[in-house]
Amino acid sequence: MPRPLAILCVSAHWMTRGTTRVHVGRQPETIHDFGGFPAALYQQQYPAPGAPEAAEAVMGLARSVPVIADTEWGLDHGAWSILIHLFPAADIPTFQLSLDLSRSPAEHFGLARELKPLRDKGVLIVGSGNIVHNLRTMRPGAPPYDWAEAFDADLTAKLEARDFRAAADYQALGDIARLAHPTVEHYLPMLYPLGAADEKDRLEFFNVGFDLASLSMRSFILQ
């Protein structure tokens, strides 16, 4: 993967309602937005610089929804826990876009389509969530639930068929969708790399598998 000039991360852990925000700060703080984990995780820092110029480009590209500048957020664990492995030097300008939970999945996909020109500016778009994410039904050491495997397989088939827009209509699966995502925030980030995809992009899956019976860790790259 070529080294990006900047990174836009859409994380399941920056949720807003009624507004979409983009962080424009020059030095985003590392946010430890979790509890009850080992002390070493709270000591992790990801001191990447911000990307205010790229963030301003987001505000200019967005047409379907207004995007508001934000200086209060930073890099939450949905962002830095991924990027610390991809780019451990933390030397690439990085910023986040919030998830407006008042918007439908189709609206998030539409916004992602509008942000596609960022790629031509060397911006890597990262969506950090889960294809299946149900914390209420976790079972340590157990095999994945049938509904979890079914949802994972259905989405995989849509992506392999390059029917990315259909991924925004996942709730049509009914009970399987509700079990896979009792809440929507861990699904929405995936729609951003899909919406910004190009027909010539090659799709590759990695890190395929389940944790705790109800978390699909399947990941993909489009380039």
Image (spheres, helix red, strand yellow):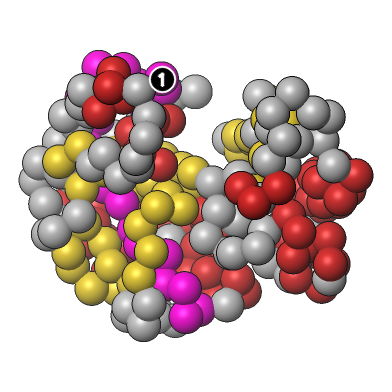
User: Horizontal and vertical percent for residue 86?
Assistant: 41, 22
Does the magenta segment cover residue 99? yes
User: Horizontal and vertical percent for residue 122?
Assistant: 36, 40
Q: Quadrant of residue 213?
A: top right
Q: Residues within 10 Å of mark 1 (few under 14, many from 20)?
A: few
Q: Nearer the viewer, residue 160 or 14?
A: 14
Numbered marks: total: 1
Mark 1 — residue? 85
Residue 198, compared with residue 214, is above or below; it is below
Q: Looking at the image, can residue 139 be seen?
A: yes
Q: Looking at the image, can residue 198 be seen?
A: no
Q: Quadrant of residue 4?
A: top left
Q: Name the residue: 31% across, 62% down.
A: 58
Does the magenta segment cover residue 32? no
User: Horizontal and vertical percent for residue 130?
Assistant: 61, 45
Q: Nearer the viewer, residue 117 or 169?
A: 169
User: Which quadrant holds the C terminus?
Assistant: top right
